[in-house]
Image (tube, rainbow, N blue to C red):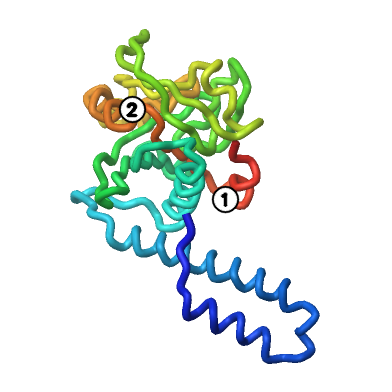
Amino acid sequence: MIYKIYPLLVFLLLSFGKDSNNTPDIKEASTKSIAKVEKFTVEAKIENVYHTLKSNNFNLPELRTFSEALKGFYLLKERGVVQKDILTLIDFSLSSNIKRLWVIDLATNTVLFNSLVAHGRNTGEEFASDFSNSNSSYKSSLGFYATGEIYQGKHGASLRLDGLERGVNDHARERAVVIHGADYVSDSFIRDNKRLGRSQGCPAIPVELTDEIIETIKNKSCLYIYHPSRSFAMEEKLIS
């Protein structure tokens, strides 16, 4: 999905052509200028989406986090890996004691849900800091996922996830890393324990929101789990 601002593109191309010293490299310069324009226009598009989000009185994610998630969404949507205009963003740079999961309808630019979400028990206490793709690690995995099908498990209705990044989260399905409800994901648990409960690696959510959220995001929507230890430049290379 490419967004172009044509006047700026023409200006850049003509600028490279003015200097006779650049003539042998004009094709390379033109290619670079096109890439710069495309990057600029994608960033502009993302900022526009962010600043026109209908918050529904929820707090919004940070622009940087949202930007990385939306870049991945555009790429995955273009490739047909995800098919819905629904983006779920989890920001594991934040305290587990605050709502750090957002479900956003990109067709209407509306935040549908803002929720607590747990990380794995070996990923950290209040803050997530250590991640893994390995079985029995009881750690969360970062990166981009496509949501799968709903099934009934030991936690009730649960949503399977397919990790899209080799070596980062591609063992999610075999690890049974899924979205499910849990009673330890609640304000009352935080009050009693000074932190949210933790999972075995699943992004567990409050029981009362489980059915609504998984019904909204099931079947090929985009989930992105963010942490500042990884950048989108890395994601772009690793996405399947």
Rendered view: 116 above or below 1: above
- Image position, residue 224 (x, y; %): 46, 40
**Is residue 74 toward the left or the right of residue 136 in the image?**
left
The secondary structure type at the circle numbered 2 is strand
- Position of the C terminus, as image quadrant, is top right
Identified at 55% across, 84% down, the residue is: 11
**Is residue 205 toward the left or the right of residue 238 in the image?**
left
* Disc on res. 32: none
Visible residue check, residue 100: no
Q: Nearer the viewer, residue 213 or 8?
A: 8
Q: Nearer the viewer, residue 148 or 223?
A: 148
Identified at 67% across, 91% down, the residue is: 18
Spatial separation of the CA atoms under disc 1 and disc 2? 25 Å
- Badge 1, how many Cα within 10 Å: few under 14, some, many 20+? some
Q: Nearer the viewer, mark 1 or mark 2?
A: 1
Q: Farthest residue to the top: give it.
A: 154
Visible residue check, residue 78: yes
What residue is disc 2 on? 205
- Image position, residue 134 (x, y; %): 63, 22
What residue is disc 1 on? 232
Identified at 53% across, 65% down, the residue is: 38
Identified at 34% across, 58% down, the residue is: 50
- Image position, residue 75 (x, y; %): 51, 47
Q: Hey, which quadrant is residue 26 in on the image?
A: bottom right
Query: Is there a contact, CB below 8 Å, between mark 1 and mark 2?
Result: no
The secondary structure type at the circle numbered 1 is helix
Which residue type carries mark 1? Phe
Q: Hey, which quadrant is residue 105 in on the image?
A: top left
Q: Farthest residue to the left: give it.
A: 56
Which residue type carries mark 2? Ile
For marks 1 and 2 on the same chain, the one whose residue lies earlier in the sequence: 2
**Is residue 60 toward the left or the right of residue 15 in the image?**
left
